Image (cartoon, grey):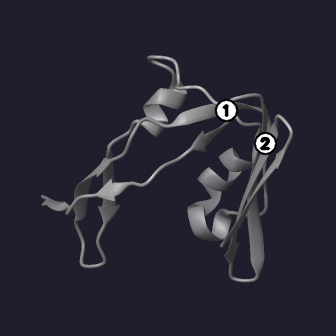
Amino acid sequence: MKHQICNEGSKKTAKYQWQVKNQWCQLTAQAIGAPELPQEGSLEQFITEHYWGYSTQRSGGSVEYHVSHVPWQVWVSTSAGFEGDASLLYGDELSQVLQGHPSSAFIADGSEVTVFRGYKLA
């Protein structure tokens, strides 16, 4: 995994890359201007203020855990995209979705995050 964040004046570019076997996948987003708190009820607010996580366990079952952080400011992207073949990691269906034009994209100015102990779900 590697990432790059570049600020050129009021332009911000974020790039996130990960390798699956010998192939690299890449998400990129560009934005202009200053970040703002997401609008109430927006998709950006839903994603950045999503305070519960879920994970499958190797032994079977799932764990639910709480995540806490201050509200994040976001830049709404002027352009965004995905490159690579994500089917090895995510399967064919999600890989096809990633190949399409994004419905929305933003860059979040994150913060420290506290992840609390998870609880096993039935």
Which residue is pictured at 61% across the width and 52% down the height? 93
The secondary element bearing badge 1 is classed as strand
- Describe residue 27's horizontal placement relative to residue 56 as left or right: right
Q: Residue furthest top?
A: 40
* Mark sitting earlier along the chain (1/2): 2
Q: Separation of disc 1 and disc 2 at Cα?
A: 9 Å
Asked if marks 1 and 2 touch (Cβ < 8 Å), the reply is: yes
Name the element at disc 2. Answer: strand
Residue 66 in the figure: left or right of residue 89: left
Residue 79 in the image: x percent, y percent?
Answer: 82, 36
- Residue drawn at (64%, 71%) of the image: 88
Question: Which is nearer the eye, 24 or 11?
Answer: 11
The amino acid on which the numbered mark 1 sits, given as a three-letter code, is Trp
67 left or right of 119? right
Seen in the picture, residue 14 relative to 9 is either above or below; the reply is below
Residue 64: image x %, image y %? 23, 55
- Work out whether 27 lies above or below 35: below
Indicate the quadrant containing the C terminus: top left, top right, bottom left or bottom right.
bottom left
- Where residue 74 sits: x, y (%)? 60, 33
Q: Amino acid at mark 2?
A: Lys
| Quadrant position of residue 78 | top right
Considering every residue shown, the one lying at the far left of the view is 122
State the residue at coordinates (59%, 26%): 36
Quarter of the view holding residue 62: bottom left
Residue designated by label 1: 75
Which residue is most to the bottom? 22
Residue at the disc numbered 2: 12
Which numbered dot is residue 96? none
Q: Nearer the viewer, residue 7 or 2?
A: 7
Quarter occupied by the N terminus: bottom right
Q: State the image coordinates of residue 108 (x, y, percent, origin top left).
A: 59, 41
- What residue lies at 77% left-to-right and 37% top-to-bottom? 101
